[in-house]
Image (spheres, rainbow, N blue to C red):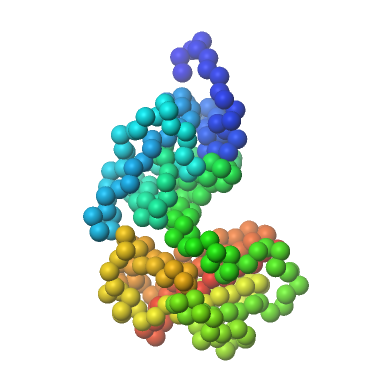
Amino acid sequence: MEEGKFKTFDSRGFVNDPVRFGALMDFQYGESEVSREEAERLLFEEENKGLAVEQFDTIGEPIKDISFWITPLDEKEREPKRFRLYANEKPASRLGANLLDLAGVDFELVQSESSTLNVNGRRKPLPILVDLAIGVPHETLVGVREFARQNLFDEKLKVRYYPNPSTYSPSVIFPQVRCFSSEGEQVFVGDIDKAPVPLREALSWNWYAQRTNGGGFHHIYGWNLGEWEKIAKSPLNKGTVTFPKAPAALFFDEVEALKDGEQRLVLNESGNMYQVQYDTYFINDGNLFRVYAEMRD
C-alpha cells in the first residue's frame, strides 16, 4: 500500500475466516517482507471475496491436471459462498480443488502466491479450505481431501457410524467394536480379536495405538468392502469409487495407488490430547477393508 494511504476494514470479514485474520496479523506484524507483501495482496486485491468457481468439466474421466482460475462471475452482486479455498498453482492446490469439485462442494477460490499462510497463528501449506459459516479451517491437502470425502457421505449415515461425543466415556476399558458389510449391515459386535475384519493389523500401523499398546480408542469400526479385484475393475463415478451405505469412498488417485501396489492408505491420523481419529483403507487376502477408530476425552 502506498505510504500515507489508509483503508478501513469491515470487521465481519475477519470473524469467520482465520486465514484472512492471519493475513491482517502478517500485514501488521509480519516478520518478513514476503509475508507482509502477500498479506497486503490478499487483504486489498481480493476484497474479502474469492472467485466463484464453476463446475469443472470432467468428461467422465478423473481430473489429472486442470487450470481452475476461472473468469469471475458478477462479483459485485454476489455474496461470499460458504466455503472459501485458498490455493496456489502448485499440484497440491490443483488436486484439492479437483477433489472438492468431484465431491460436489460449491466453493469460491482465492489465489495466493505464497506456499504457506497464517492460520490461527501458525503457518500452514496450501491448500486451505475455510467454512465461513462457522470459521473452521481444513488445513493442507490432507484436510481438504478429508472434507471432500466426508461430503460424499449421507449425513444420517455419518451420525450412525460416528456417535455423538456425549456417548463417549474415558472410563471405558474395552472399546466398542463393530464390523459391517459394504452395504452397511452390521455383521459383528464384540471382542476385537474375534472380529471378521483384521482390526488388530490395521491398528498396528497407528501411532496412538502403538503408544497405548493397542488400547485407548473408544470406538473401532471395520468394513469389508468386497473383493478388490472386482472393485478395481469397476468404473469410476465422477472420479470416485463409493460405498454410500458403508459409508466409504476412494478418490481416483487413491484407487490408482492401490492398483499400483500400495497395500494400505492411511487417510486420517490426526490427534491431540482430547481427540484422536484414525482412518485407513487396505487390502488383505484379496479384499478391500476400511477401519475407523476414534478416541474422545
Quarter holding the C terminus? bottom right
Q: Would residue 266 be found to the left or right of residue 213 on screen? A: left
At a point 36% along the width and 67% down the height, the residue shown is: 241
At a point 42% along the width and 66% down the height, the residue shown is: 249
As drawn, which residue projects farthest toward the top? 4
Residue 170 appears in the rendering: yes
Q: Would residue 13 be found to the left or right of residue 104 on screen? A: right
Using the image, determine if residue 177 lies above or below residue 111.
below
Quarter-of-image position of residue 2: top left
At a point 52% along the width and 45% down the height, the residue shown is: 131
Using the image, determine if residue 191 lies above or below residue 63.
below
Is 34 or 206 nearer to us in this picture?
A: 206
Is 9 or 210 nearer to us in this picture?
A: 9
In the rendered image, residue 82, in percent from the top left (x then y), is placed at 50, 42
Using the image, determine if residue 139 lies above or below residue 16.
below
In the rendered image, residue 151, in percent from the top left (x then y), is placed at 46, 57
Quarter-of-image position of residue 224: bottom left
As drawn, which residue projects farthest toward the right? 171
At a point 31% along the width and 42% down the height, the residue shown is: 68
Count the marks: 0
In the rendered image, residue 14, in percent from the top left (x then y), is placed at 57, 33
In the rendered image, residue 165, in percent from the top left (x then y), is placed at 67, 63
Residue 199 appears in the rendering: no
Is 204 or 257 nearer to us in this picture?
A: 257
